Amino acid sequence: MESESTVTTCYRHPKVESHVRCTRCDRYICPDCMREAAVGHQCPECVREGARSVRQARTAFGGQITAAPTVTYVLIALNVLAYLAEMVRPSVVDRFDMLGTVPPGYLPEGVAHGEWYRLLTGAFLHLPPTGGTFGILHIVMNMVSLWNIGRVVEMQLGRVRYLTLYLLSALGGSVLVLLIAPTTPTLGASGAIFGLGAAYYVMARRLGADMDAVNRFMAGLLLWLVISAWVTSWQGHLGGLLAGGLVTLAYAYAPRDSRRTLVQAGACLALLALLVILAMAKVAELTI
């Protein structure tokens, strides 16, 4: 006498008969729930759980590998939008450029008078078409440089580390302007871009790249730093270069284990704290 066979059904669709088990959890699954696996099939829940447990690929500096330099595109867009705002309303420049303070007798304004936002907003403004030595070439040169250098640096660092580097470099440039030339209005992304240049050099050395082309690039960057002493804010360029170099040294030489992110974040926070302390000390001096 033959015993009646038990009908097995999909655990997600109890009305559907199934004879295939998930190779991971051993539950029965129907054709609609089957997901191809290395061996056999898995259920949707096990596929999602496996995706969460798979370690994401990282760059040599700990950042997540990205398919496109999205942050670079966004930064360029923000600079261009700020430039359009300047053309529509020229007062934007005087309201948001980097300015530490004004000489006695003028209406109080600048970082020393509570306008701390200028430390970053000035890095997204550029000379208007009819302004200064360069005019519209100011933003064109900076955006071309950001396009060329930023994409390379972002793909190596990942988005979060790259954005942190960019903002700290911009802040480093503004703080050095505040320390050395507080009454000189400055604007432009050059400080942040100099920081990216320093990052490019540090990363190339850490990765063991052919340094001939890299050294030529750095020689040109440093030459422009010297030339800029006569026509632009060399303080902003130098401050960005130093800040970017320090951040990238922390990125490049942090231990390559579970402590890496903590060390990198700690170094960035330490630099941020130093820049804030220097800025506050200078503001206190200017407001005595």
Image (cartoon, rainbow, N blue to C red):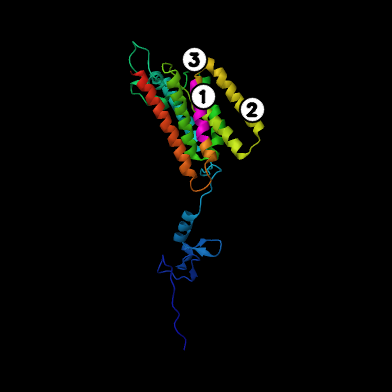
Q: Give the labeled residue for mark 1.
A: 238
Dot label at residue 132: 3
| Mark 2 neighbour class, 10 Å CA radius: few under 14, some 14 to 19, many 20 or more | few
**Does the segment drawn in magenta span residue 274?**
no
Q: Given the image, on which type of amino acid does mark 1 rest?
A: Leu
Circle 2 SS class? helix
Q: Quadrant of the C terminus?
A: top left
Dot 3 or dot 2, earlier in sequence? 3
Q: Given the image, on which type of amino acid does mark 3 rest?
A: Gly
**Residue 99 rendering spot, x and y as whole percentages:** 40, 20
Task: Confirm whether residue 68 shows in the render.
Answer: no
- The residue nearer to you, when weighing 119 against 255, is 255
Position of 163 with respect to 222 (left or right) is left
Circle 1 SS class? helix
Dot 2 or dot 1, earlier in sequence? 2
Q: Given the image, on which type of amino acid does mark 2 rest?
A: Arg
* 2 and 1 marks in contact (CB < 8 Å): no
The quarter of the picture where residue 219 lies is top right
- The residue nearer to you, when weighing 15 against 201, is 201
Dot 3 or dot 1, earlier in sequence? 3
**Residue 200 rendering spot, x and y as whole percentages:** 57, 33
Q: Nearer the viewer, mark 3 or mark 2?
A: 2
**Residue 66 rendering spot, x and y as whole percentages:** 52, 43
Q: Could you give the CA–CA distance between mark 3 and mark 2, rounded to whole angstroms?
A: 29 Å
Q: Could you give the CA–CA distance between mark 2 and mark 1, rounded to whole angstroms?
A: 18 Å
Task: Specify the segment rendered in magenta.
Answer: 235-248
Q: Give the labeled residue for mark 2.
A: 216
Residue at 66% from the left image edge and 31% from the top image edge: 212
Q: Vertical placement of 27 versus 203: above or below?
A: below
Q: Please, what is the dominant secondary structure of the magenta stretch? A: helix
Task: Confirm whether residue 53 shows in the render.
Answer: yes
Dot label at residue 43: none
